Amino acid sequence: MDHGGVGVKQHPLKGRSGSAVPHSRILVVDDEEDLLELVRFNLARDGYEVLGVVSGEEALKAVRRDPPDLIVLDLMLPGLDGLEVCRRLKADPRTREIPIVMLTAKSEERDVVSGLERGADDYITKPFSPRVLSARVKALLRRLESERNADLESTVEVHDLVIHPGRHEVHLSGEVVDLTYTEFALLHFLAKKPGWAFTRTQIVDAVKGEDYPVTERSVDVQVAGLRKKLGEHASYIETVRGVGYRFRA
């Protein structure tokens, strides 16, 4: 199999029709070209259009040129690393809602936490099964599509907070709150049932899908980031000792 840089960088693979989320475009960023080619091949086989690049700088250029529906981003990249690429994309209003799945060869908790703190929506540690990656990608895209098709009548209003699922917007005291995809899903899930306490497992099942491996620290990091963005209203999300979290009634 040819792994030449030109082919990897410039020519997207187009998958067969019949994908669960047809016509979705995925950008894969990894400097290990053999792995990049493997990921591209498997995602294209699932029906996605896939573009691969080997550096953080190329990733930013590709996203600005033609924003994808989802990004698979390696943590350890030469030059501009994956954490910085993630931070820049999530800080830009034009790209902050693009779901990002981070790939990392490191299993240390601090690396996972660093990625989540910068807005990553999911992570997978190397080595990994292509089937696992495909399942994670499919789940993220399905949830994104579901939110885009959400009925505007399902707007949630509680305290000074208004959540518009159909528009993927959150207003707090009349001001727009910029949230990542996962932060939005987490807030919407809790706010729909004020006063109800949910375990971390229930939260992960609702936000990321059933049978998803639960990492307590990753849930706590997402909640901490959400509270920070809620500012003086951070107390809306309460910690229930020995259980998990709830939205204040």
Image: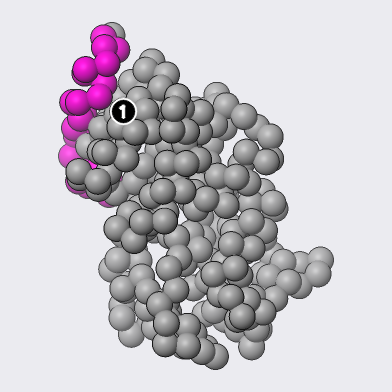
The answer to whether one can see residue 127 in this image is yes
Measured as percent of width and height from the top left, residue 43 is found at: 32, 33
Instruction: Name the residue rendered at 49%, 73% in the picture.
Output: 188
**Foreground residue, 58 or 23?**
58
Report the coloring of the rendering.
one colour
Q: Quadrant of the N terminus?
A: top left
Q: In the image, residue 242 lies at what x, y percent?
A: 81, 66
| Rendered view: 146 above or below 118 | below
- Look at the picture and state if 51 lies above or below 68: above
> Which residue corresponds to the image point at 32% horizontal and 40% vertical from the top-left?
60
Q: Is residue 12 on the magenta stretch?
A: yes
Q: Residue furthest front?
A: 79
Q: Quadrant of the C terminus?
A: bottom right
Can you identify the residue that label 1 sits on? 53
Query: At x 57% / y 52%, what residue is drawn?
Result: 117
User: In the picture shown, does residue 189 fall above or below 153?
Assistant: above
Nearer to us in this view, 87 or 212: 87
Q: Residue at x 35, y 25 (%)?
A: 54
State which region is magenta: 2-25
Figure disc tally:
1
Residue that extends furthest to the right in the rendered view of this protein: 242
Q: Amino acid at mark 1?
A: Val
Outermost residue toward the top? 1
| Nearest the eye: 57 or 42 | 57
Please indicate whether residue 14 sits to the left or right of residue 72 in the image. Answer: left
* Residue 127 position in % (x across, y down): 55, 24
Residue 244 part of the magenta-drawn span? no
Residue 161 placement, left or right of 49: right
**Residue 142 shows in the view:** no
